[in-house]
Structures are given as C-alpha cells and as structure tokens.
Image (cartoon, coloured by chain):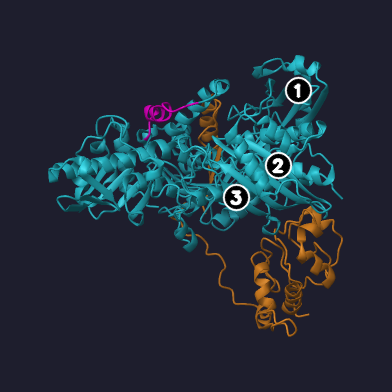
C-alpha cells in the first residue's frame, strides 16, 4: 500500500481559493491509500454456517400456535443476527439474549434509552417490548412498529431461545 | 421513463451551445432542426416539437420538463399532452427533458403564465413575486411549488399537444389535398371521412415536422376532454412495483467507487485536523479526504467507506453558532419580537387600522405559537454520482433542480456550465430537499480530487444532522372583536418569511383591518424549502388562532370560518363539504374531539377535519376528512393520492417532527429520535375533490399539508380543552 499525503501543496491551493465565500473545491488534505487499479484485499466472505445457525434453522414450528418462529423472526433478522459469535448488525446480536440484562451485548452501541431501561429480558418483558417497542422504551433505536399478534410474539421468543440453544 | 443515452447527452451540450429557439407553440418558427440531433434517434423518427416526439411506428413520446419524485407529474403531464393531441394513451412513452438551459426559457415562462393571470388587487404585489418565481421555475426546470401540472402542464404540455395535432392535420391536409378542418383525429389516427382516407400519426410524422408551428393552437374545452379529468393509471407504477425503476442511487458508472461523508457537526465550522490512522488500514479504503467543510472516505464499497469514516477522529474550528441551544433560538425570536412590539418590524400588509380597532375592541384575543426546525427525511438517502475529468463533469442523480445543480457544480469546480452534464433519474422523495445542490457539489468535489467516478451516499445520520431545515419560527397575534362579536382587527408578527410571500396573509377571511409584519432572526443552520414551505408554519399559526378567536367569541369554529368566508363562494363550498363529510357537530365519545382547518395555498383550496382519540397516553388521530378544490383535477386519483400523502407527511411533523440543537449541533440522528408516522398510527382518510374552476388550476403536491396540523391540534382542544401552542405534539403530556 502506498500512503501519500499531499497536504502541504493542497493546503496552499485551498488558501488561495478561500478568498471567496464558497468552499474551496480542492481538499485540504488528501490521503491516497491505494489506486483503484491496485488489488484490494478480498474481504472474508462465505463463511460456513455455524452449528448454532444450523440449530436455529432446524427449530420447529411452535406446536401450540402453529406459527413458525423462524419465519416470524425474519422481520427481526433484517437487523439482528442470532448465531453464536455473529457480529452485531444494525441491531445487536441476539444469541442468548433471553434472561440477559438489556444493553448487555458487548461492542454494540445502544441508545441511551435502552441503556437506562434497567430491565432484564424475561419472557414477559420481551413480550411487552415486542408489542410496542417505542411505547415500552421511548427513544429506543429499534425502528419497529411492533408485533401486534401475541401468538406471533410468543413464537419469536421461543425461536430466540431455541436458536440460542437454551 | 425512457433514459438518455450518453451519446444523446453529449449531443445536448452541443445543442445548448447553439442558438436554440425555445418558444415552441407560442411563437412562429420551428425549432425542430436544432432539436432533431438531440432527440431523434434512428431513421424515420421525427421531432414534432420540443415536448413531444412521434416515430414512424406511431409511438408518441411526451418529453416532460419536470422530475418524478413520486408525485405522478410525469404521467399526468403526458396525459394532458395525449388528450390535446388525440393520441392512443397506451402508445404514449415518457421521457424527462434533458437538463439543458435552452429547453425552457424565460420568455416561454412569461408568455405562458402572464396572459390569464387574474388576482385580487390586495395580492398584486405578492403575485408579482409569485409570477417571477414561476418564471424562474421554468427557467431552471425546477420541480416544486406545486407547479408542474398547473404551470408546465396547463400552459406547456397542453399547448404542445394541441400544436402537434394541428401540424399533423396540416401535413395530412397538404398531402391529401383536402381542407384541414375536414380532418378528424382520434387514437393517433388521422381520418378524412368524405374521401375515406386514413393514416396513422406515424405516417405523417416526417411531414408534420416541416410544418410551421401554429402561433396559437386551439386547446380543448373541458367538455371535449377524453383523458384529462380521468383517473388514468400512472405510467411509472409498474416499474416501481417490479423494481426496475431507476433512482439516482441506482446509477452505475464504469470504474465507479463509493464515498461516505461527514460534515462538521456545527454548520459553519471547518475540519481542522483528521486522524485517519485506523481508517487507512481498513479494507477497501482508497482515499481519505479532508475537504475543509467535510471529511470523505472513498472505498471499493459504500459500507467499507462508511465503516472507515466512523473511525476517523476530527477536530473542528470554532464556529459562530457553536454555543447555541434550542432554548436560545426561541429566546432570540422572543427578543426580536419584543423589540418590534405591536407595530414594528417589516410590514407585509397594512390594511385599515388594526392597532386602533384593537384598542377599541370589546373583546381582545392574543396568542403566541412556536414551531420547530424540521428535516425532510427522504426515503432514498441523499446521493450523487459524479465523474470529473478532461475539463468536464458528468452527474447522475435525482434532483428537483437539474439546471440549478449544473450551474452550482460548474461554479464550484470552476467549469463552464456547458461542460457539466446531468442525467436525472427518479427521486425517492423530494419534499424540497432535492431542490438544493449542496449534495451534488460535494460529490463533484470528491470526484475531482480522486480523478475517477464516485458515488457519494449520505448516511441517514448525516441526512438528519446536516439537512437544509424547515425553519423554526415564533408567531404572535392580537385580534379584536367588536361589540357584536365580529372579528375586526388582526395583528400578526412572525419571525422568518421565505416563500410563498402570501403564506402569512389572510385575504380570504373578511377582516376589515389587518397588519401583518415579520422580523428576520439570523441563524447559523442552513434552510431550504420543505413541503408547502412557509404555509407549513403560517397555516398552523393562523388556523390555531382563528380557533382560539372562535372560542373567545363563543362561536363554533366552523361557524366563525363560515362567517369570514361568506363572500367567497368557492372557499365556502370547500369548507362546507369538509364539514358535511365529517358530520360536523354530531356527538363524539368522551375524550374524542373534532377540529377543522381551512387553507388556500398554491392556487388550491383545502379544508380538513381531523378526529382525535385522547383517551390513551398519546394523541391518536383516527380520521381525516379532506375536501380539496384544485381548480380541475387532471387526474383525480393522483390529486387524491397527493392529499393523502400530504396528510401522512403533515401528521408525522405534527406528532413527532422536531430538530433541536445543542451547542450548535443538531441532536437528532436517525429514525429513533426523528420519528416517522407508523402504519398502525395512520388515520382513515377520506378525500373529496371539487372542480371549482377549470381555467385556473391550483397545485396538488403541497396544499394538502398546511391544514393538517391545525385541524389536529384544534381537535385536541375540542377533546381536552388544552390548547397546543407549540409543536410537535410529542412535547406535550395529555395523561
């Protein structure tokens, strides 16, 4: 990798151009890490699924309500991973979330609201949160309108426990 | 929507350099020779005039001079042209006009708009301003001001369609040697009944292009309309449903890389120093740029750029607004308003003797209202793809102002405007945000620095914190009622006035004496137009205050408005219809309430009744009745959709919308703290349209918004007795 800083030269051009009120077109500092023609390091991709996600995939349809918890969780999976050790996404990784204190996933940047909530994710707490997240914890970043169907919420919670191997 | 090929695009630059005649359809002389190389592609395809093209296969292309941002203008403009031209609607294609200045001109704007302008005398100075801004919109090909249908459509597309039809008829008359008056047209077919001759438009396309443009083509009377006034399905819907529609963010350019950006949190501050030691080592990163007013990371992928950007530590210069908190903003307004008192400030209207009649009034009503800054929150993130090389700049994006963007980018890069091209795509929401060129200027500056094409995308956080906001404002009122309970004095002073100039005015209400003033309070934030612009603040102030006056006068809010509109039958009809739809006056359950508001704006008249349920922990709007008179609804389905979407957008703002500042920086960052209305909060909406004057069209995109907030807060008052004098509603507790 090349690392060229052309700051000195460019600062001068910027100073000359700064006489007007418009911002200068040129950068004050330009760090060229790599030209597009240079090969990039390929990002780690196509990792094989972990045993946990395999387990999660095998989670059965809820025997009582007939709602497929995994299918119901799909709306959550837009933002949340649940496999063990998977990185947090837009929302935190949910592996083992049930029974944990809120805002406890390391490395995830929570909203001040959820950090201050001081709740533990029991089934009842999770159920009321999923029913209307913004009502329960105003200021949460979880931009979901909530799951109105109680059976569907129960299936999601059961799936979250299954997928965590608990 | 058709797409401009790169070849045609470069061609446009060449044409723009020449002496292109633009006054199509209202001027003698035919501009097709100059436009032909730009628009015609392939043999057998002839240009009839600047806004329509007919090919030999009888395919008609409407060339529309406005952007499509979900409002449906492309399709309805084509519908108007197709009706006047008697073409087969199924065979109509739509192409957005190229972003070249020659395409629309000042003369065209003035000639089209001026002749039929009829305004009440009191509004004349205002309309002068409005007229200039309309002409300006045509100059700049702006999509805004609820202008497309009533301006370009009514004056441009219809005239172009009528002219094209007359030229086709003239060409057939010449060839068949029959009087033009004996030729009839329908479904893209020319027929001469007595001789039995018949031909498609396509067959005469070439010959029609050589005809002189009619000086004043005859447009259809309303009873002759076949497509206008009908709910024709929009042509852009299929591609939006199947995902093939091309938005600015979909632009793909060979060799393109991605940029993520972060500006100094306090507007006006500059980036003094950056520590990019971590970012330099991150995957995909190509360049890290301190652009002075913002930091950019260019990478192979957008997410890589955004992740690397997040690791950069920056220090910023001091800035003028850096100590300002939201409370200070309203304190500044209060100080400015205190200073001007009851008669100072910049006078906007002074009719009669508002001060004197107020002093003698039997009953006096005063109130102060406050509204916050608002962000636009377009669904498609702000973005622009730019390539700068060999003294040229090419831009790909969705913009409401293609020519203004070209001009501003050219200025920023020190290029000639002819060397900046712009390819406009669909806009994933505009609301006024995409009428400004700050985003493309940033993208062009990055692309110039890198030397290769760059697609710059703003994160939602950047969009929320660096928007060109709807200004916050404070407004104060004094009103006087005489001994008979008649409203005789109206005195208002408000901070801020941008556009339209008539937004704080109340000429529709019969009030003998009014004094309306403003004070300017400078602020470091950047402002821009926001759906319905100043009507979004002023209508809430005015219609809240009218409601308060009604309460003080012991009158029903509907009755007071009826009295004030007694001499305006068109206005009264809209108000009465909305009241009738809502069954105004009927009993409501405990904790529920009904509120009404009436606002003429952008040439249209809208009344809304909102019903609220205040029995829960927060206000719930259950129903909105809306009656709108846009003059003549060219596409009733489209107008109703615009009313509905304005109600969603307006309700979002009334319930939640608030941008606040702390230490000069915006506190909100994303949808968790700048909330949108959720689907479960959407009220039932009923819309009724009245075609009150088919000669004088009003707009549809914006007029549905201003009445919504006052209708809701007036309903909250009806339900709870609590008057809301500061928005949004989420600031208030109703428990």
Question: Within 10 Å of the Cα at label 3, are there few (<14), some (14-19), or many (20+) other Cα atoms?
Answer: some
Of residues B553 and B162, the one nearer the viewer is: B553
Question: Within 10 Å of the Cα at label 1, are there few (<14), some (14-19), or many (20+) other Cα atoms?
Answer: many
- Residue B567's x, y, as percent? 62, 29
Q: Secondary structure at mark 3?
A: strand
**Residue B577's image quarter?**
top right
Q: Are marks 1 and 2 on the same chain?
A: yes
Q: Are marks 3 and 2 on the same chain?
A: yes
- Residue A126's x, y, as percent? 80, 68
Q: Which chain is orange?
A: A
In the picture, the disc for residue B337 is 1
Q: Chain of mark 2?
A: B
Q: Residue at coordinates 72% horizontally, 23% vertically from top-left?
A: B490
Of residues A2 and B222, the one nearer the viewer is: B222
Among the two numbered marks 1 and 2 on one chain, the one whose residue lies closer to the N terminus: 1
Question: Please, is residue B153 above or below residue A33 in the view?
Answer: above
- Answer whether residue B116 is magenta in the image: yes
Mark 3 highlights which residue? Answer: B687
Among the two numbered marks 3 and 2 on one chain, the one whose residue lies closer to the N terminus: 2
Whether tag 1 and tag 2 are in contact, CB under 8 A, the answer is no
Question: Please, is residue A10 above or below residue A102 in the view?
Answer: above
Whether tag 3 and tag 2 are in contact, CB under 8 A, the answer is no
Mark 2 highlights which residue? Answer: B596
| Numbered circles on residues, count | 3
């Amino acid at each position: 990798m090349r690392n060229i800083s052309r700051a000195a030269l460019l600062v001068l051009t910027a100073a000359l151009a700064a006489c007007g009120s418009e911002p200068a077109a040129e950068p004050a500092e330009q760090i060229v890490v790599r030209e597009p023609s240079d090969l990039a390091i390929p990002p780690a991709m196509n990792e094989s699924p972990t045993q946990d996600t395999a387990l999660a995939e095998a989670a059965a349809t809820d025997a009582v309500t007939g709602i497929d918890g995994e299918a119901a969780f799909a709306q959550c999976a837009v933002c949340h991973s649940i496999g063990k050790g998977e990185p947090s996404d837009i929302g935190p990784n949910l592996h083992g979330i049930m029974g944990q204190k809120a805002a406890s996933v390391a490395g995830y940047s929570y909203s001040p609201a959820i950090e201050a909530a001081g709740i533990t994710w029991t089934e009842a707490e999770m159920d009321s949160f999923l029913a209307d997240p913004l009502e329960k914890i105003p200021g949460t970043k979880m931009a979901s309108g909530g799951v109105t169907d109680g059976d569907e919420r129960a299936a999601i919670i059961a799936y979250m426990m299954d997928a965590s191997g608990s | 929507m058709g797409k401009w090929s790169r070849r045609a695009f470069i061609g446009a630059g060449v044409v723009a350099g020449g002496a292109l005649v633009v006054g199509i359809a209202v001027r003698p002389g035919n501009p097709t020779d100059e436009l032909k190389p730009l628009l015609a592609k392939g043999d057998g395809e002839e240009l009839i005039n600047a806004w329509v093209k007919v090919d030999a296969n009888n395919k008609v292309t409407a060339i529309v001079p406005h952007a499509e941002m979900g409002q449906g203008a492309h399709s309805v403009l084509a519908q108007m042209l197709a009706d006047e031209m008697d073409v087969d609607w199924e065979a109509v294609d739509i192409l957005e006009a190229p972003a070249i200045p020659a395409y629309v001109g000042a003369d065209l704007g003035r000639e089209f708009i001026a002749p039929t302008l009829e305004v009440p005398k009191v509004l004349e100075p205002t309309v002068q301003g409005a007229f200039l801004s309309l002409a300006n919109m045509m100059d700049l090909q702006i999509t805004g001001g609820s202008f497309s249908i009533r301006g370009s459509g009514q004056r441009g597309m219809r005239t172009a369609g009528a002219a094209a039809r007359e030229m086709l008829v003239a060409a057939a008359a010449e060839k068949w040697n029959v009087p033009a008056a004996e030729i009839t047209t329908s479904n893209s077919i020319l027929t001469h009944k007595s001789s039995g001759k018949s031909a498609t438009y396509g067959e005469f396309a070439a010959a029609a292009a050589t005809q002189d443009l009619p000086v004043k083509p005859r447009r259809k009377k309303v009873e002759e309309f076949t497509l206008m006034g009908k709910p024709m399905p929009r042509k852009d819907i299929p591609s939006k449903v199947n995902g093939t529609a091309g938005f600015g963010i979909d632009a793909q350019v060979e060799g393109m890389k991605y940029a993520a950006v972060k500006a100094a949190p306090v507007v006006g501050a500059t980036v003094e120093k950056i520590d990019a030691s971590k970012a330099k080592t991150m995957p995909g990163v190509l360049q890290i740029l301190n652009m002075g007013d913002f930091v950019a990371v260019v990478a192979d992928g957008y997410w890589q750029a955004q992740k690397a950007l997040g690791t950069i530590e920056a220090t910023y210069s001091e800035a003028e607004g850096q100590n300002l908190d939201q409370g200070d903003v309203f304190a500044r307004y209060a100080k400015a308003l205190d200073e001007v008192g009851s008669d100072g400030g910049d006078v906007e209207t002074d009719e009669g003797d508002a001060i004197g009649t107020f002093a003698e009034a039997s009953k006096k009503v005063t109130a102060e209202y406050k509204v916050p800054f608002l962000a636009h929150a377009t669904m498609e993130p702000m973005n622009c793809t730019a390539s700068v090389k060999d003294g040229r700049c090419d831009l790909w994006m969705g913009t409401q102002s293609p020519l203004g963007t070209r001009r501003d980018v050219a200025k920023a890069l020190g290029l000639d405007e002819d060397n900046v091209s712009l390819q406009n795509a669909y806009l994933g929401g505009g609301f006024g945000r995409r009428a400004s060129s700050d985003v493309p200027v940033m993208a062009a500056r990055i692309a110039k620095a890198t030397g290769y094409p760059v697609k710059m995308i703003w994160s939602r956080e950047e969009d929320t914190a660096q928007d060109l906001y709807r200004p916050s404002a404070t407004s104060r009122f004094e009103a006087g009622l005489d001994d008979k309970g008649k409203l005789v004095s109206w005195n208002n002073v408000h901070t801020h006035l941008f556009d339209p100039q008539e937004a704080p005015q109340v000429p529709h209400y019969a009030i003998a004496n009014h004094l309306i003033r403003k004070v300017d309070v400078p602020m470091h934030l950047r402002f821009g137009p926001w759906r319905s612009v100043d009507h979004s603040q002023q209508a809430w102030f005015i219609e809240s205050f009218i409601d308060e006056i009604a309460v003080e006068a012991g009158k029903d809010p509907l009755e007071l408005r009826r009295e004030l509109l007694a001499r305006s039958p068109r206005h009264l009809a809209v108000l009465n219809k909305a009241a009738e739809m809502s069954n105004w006056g009927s009993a409501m359950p405990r904790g529920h309430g009904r509120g009404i508001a009436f606002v003429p704006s952008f040439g249209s008249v809208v009344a809304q009744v909102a019903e609220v349920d205040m029995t829960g922990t927060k206000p719930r709007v259950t129903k909105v009745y809306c009656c709108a008179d846009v003059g003549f609804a060219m596409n009733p389905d489209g107008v109703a959709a615009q009313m509905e979407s304005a109600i969603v957008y307006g309700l979002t703002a009334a319930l939640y919308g608030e941008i606040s500042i702390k230490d000069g920086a915006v506190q909100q960052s994303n949808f968790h703290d700048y909330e949108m209305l959720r689907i479960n909060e959407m009220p039932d909406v009923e819309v009724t349209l009245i075609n009150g004057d088919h000669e004088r069209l009003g707009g549809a995109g914006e007029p549905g918004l201003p009445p919504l907030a006052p209708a809701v807060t007036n309903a909250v008052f009806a339900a709870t007795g609590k008057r809301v004098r500061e928005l949004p509603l989420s600031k208030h507790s109703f428990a």
